[in-house]
Amino acid sequence: ALDFRDVVGQEGARRAAVTAAAGFHHMLMIGPPGTGKTMIAGCIPSILPPLTEEERLEVASVRSVAGQPPGHGRPFVSLHHTVSAAAFLGGGRMPGPGAVSMAHRGVLFLDELTEFRRATLDLLRQPLEEHRVRIARSGGSCCYPADFMLVGAMNPCPCGYYPDRNRCRCRDVEIRRYLNRISGPILDRMDIC
């Protein structure tokens, strides 16, 4: 398990992560490759307060429905940008919990945020508002909890090095197109950037 004490440097990102963890705020880190965004995200569960007994039961219940052991501490779920909608929110013939519910009371980390399909990211709108996921199928419907801290990481441009014009060769139109892959409603929900 990663520990926040192992993060060296990046004082601004460290302070933002501590502030986000203190208030369970959603956070977006933007920076060039190799600057430690993924490591900082992975360390956030180590600075969140321990689960209460009620929270521990909620987390264990979701994991049990998914056929997984109870686990220890706050969940940390990291997704690849090719994730399907069913894996993201949950579903199937017998609807099971997806990644957003598996991250309940923990951290949902989306690395390379701009590489996710816009439609997939927009699926987060209901869980971020209501802290739950409702899945309806012809055989019935179910509701899973989804109160998580969303942490995203992305590069500032397609090559990753903007605004360093000695390394970045991206045109302004390419940078705008790249940043516009994330919808406004999702960006609006990021409390700390």
Image: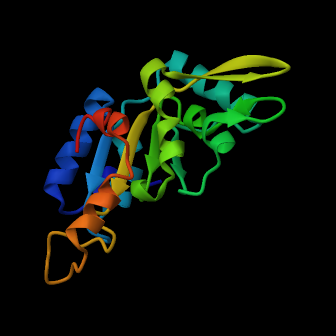
The quarter in which the C terminus is drawn is top left
Which of 192 and 7 lies nearest the eye of the viewer? Answer: 192
**Number of marks:** 0
Q: Residue furthest bottom?
A: 166
**Residue 166 position (above or below residue 154):** below
The image quarter containing residue 49 is top left
Find residue 151 and report its horizontal and vertical position in percent. Answer: 38, 44
Q: Residue at x 60, y 40 (%)?
A: 99
Residue 116 placement (x, y as % from top left): 49, 54
User: Of 81 and 46, which appears nearest the observer?
Assistant: 81
Spot occupied by residue 123 in the image (x, y as percentages of width and height)? 53, 35
Whether residue 5 is visible: yes
Q: Residue at x 60, y 41 (%)?
A: 88
Q: Residue drawn at (29%, 71%), measured in percent from left and top?
A: 160
**x and y, in percent, of residue 180 in the image:** 33, 52
Location of residue 191 by image quarter: top left
Q: Could one spot residue 74 in this view of the protein?
A: no
Is 72 situated left or right of 125 in this image? right
Image side of residue 172 versus residue 123, left or right: left
Foreground: 159 or 105? 159
